[in-house]
Image (cartoon, rainbow, N blue to C red):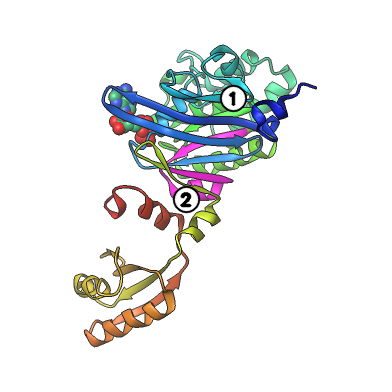
Amino acid sequence: MTDRSSRDGVVGSASVAVSARNLGKSYGDTVAVRDLSFDARAGEVMGLLGPNGAGKTTTIKMLTTLLPIDSGSATIVGIDVAAQPDAVRRVIGLAGQFAAVDEKLTAQENLEMFGRLYKIPKTERTQRVDHLIDRFDMGEFADRIAETYSGGQRRRLDVVASLIASPPVLFLDEPTTGLDPRSRTELWDEIADLATQGTAVVLTTQYLDEADRLSDRIIIIDEGVVKASGTSAELKTSLERDVLEVHVVSAEDLDRAVEVAEQVASGVSSDSEDRLLQIPLTDGSSQSLAVLRQFDASDIPIDDFQLRRPTLDDVFLTLTATGGNR
Ligand SMILES: Nc1ncnc2c1ncn2[C@@H]1O[C@H](COP(=O)(O)OP(=O)(O)O)[C@@H](O)[C@H]1O
Ligand SMILES: [Mg+2]
């Protein structure tokens, strides 16, 4: 056995599949990623969550050898990304990137080809291709050549092609963007299955429900830096606030209701279609009473209300720069 676990003094690094240390990248004057560090372990889904322009794609491109690293370092299953890019490419998958789909081949043939490329034995390969075609509902077009596909069909093939080989480390950059809801759910299940089998998955997303549902751990990034990290539950707890949801009877009262609520709380948001106010409170129960009394005193009738725990949405909106305006 090689002594990988004690190298660099990092305990248990044998199971660390991705290690990013102080990564930085600029495009001219634009700092896309600054001082970004995280680990992902085998069998774990690590969610990189952040709004548009946060630096997610730049991070993935550095980790997958597609962009040179400006500062900091990264290893994939112990292999240094900058020093051994070819070796790194052999142990990773990346949706829609290395899997260059051949337009003149059918989905079935493309997937077969990727399976052969990764030297998956024939029987297993056929099973895997059939399983993925079935799971992603590609049967109706799997026998047509790829250049005839709709955008959504093509997107499914791109993503599925990255799943064929079950590489030790899989990078998925906003994998469900452009997928229909059903394919999205199937992809979530497939990703969870791969992680159960030991694959480390690094997934970027702008969708909070996706990060919440899939990720074992999440880092929230914005403007190239880590704003928060932890499990979904930890992130929600760290926010230390609850949210009072109030439905007003009449949409016409909504603006006035926001003004009234803001006398007690800040960061109130409203949705006129649902006649709903979301009021973040640091001291849930006593502030709730204060808000409800104010509505009563101001003659704003309400349908119902509930105090709820924060969702990942609340965490995200609190921590990322543009807050509720996005
Ligand atoms: N090729 C490029 N040239 C110049 N600026 C870029 C380039 N790619 C990305 N950027 C900028 O870097 C920042 C991070 O972008 P990106 O990594 O694509 O974020 P995300 O994937 O989270 O949306 C943004 O400000 C973006 O405009
Ligand atoms: Mg991106």
Q: Secondary structure at mark 2?
A: helix
Q: Quadrant of the N terminus?
A: top right
Classify 112 as above or below 10: above
Foreground pick, 169 / 229: 229
Residue pictured at 39% horizontal, 32% vertical: 34
| Residue pointed to by mark 1 | 76
Please give the label number shown on residue 50. none
Highlighted range, magenta: 200-220
Foreground pick, 310 / 35: 35
Give the CA separation, mark 1 to mark 2.
27 Å
Regarding residue 139, the answer to whether it shows in the image is: no
Is 115 on the left or on the right of 204, as rendered?
Answer: right
Asked if residue 14 lies in the magenta stretch, the reply is: no
| Residue pointed to by mark 2 | 209
Is 290 on the left or on the right of 162, as rendered?
Answer: left
Q: Which image quarter: residue 122? A: top right
Q: Say what amino acid the circle numbered 1 marks.
A: Ile
Residue 251 rendering spot, x and y as whole percentages:
23, 71
Callout in the foreground (1, 2): 1
Q: Secondary structure at mark 1?
A: strand
Residue pictured at 44% horizontal, 21% vertical: 69
Q: Say what amino acid the circle numbered 2 marks.
A: Asp
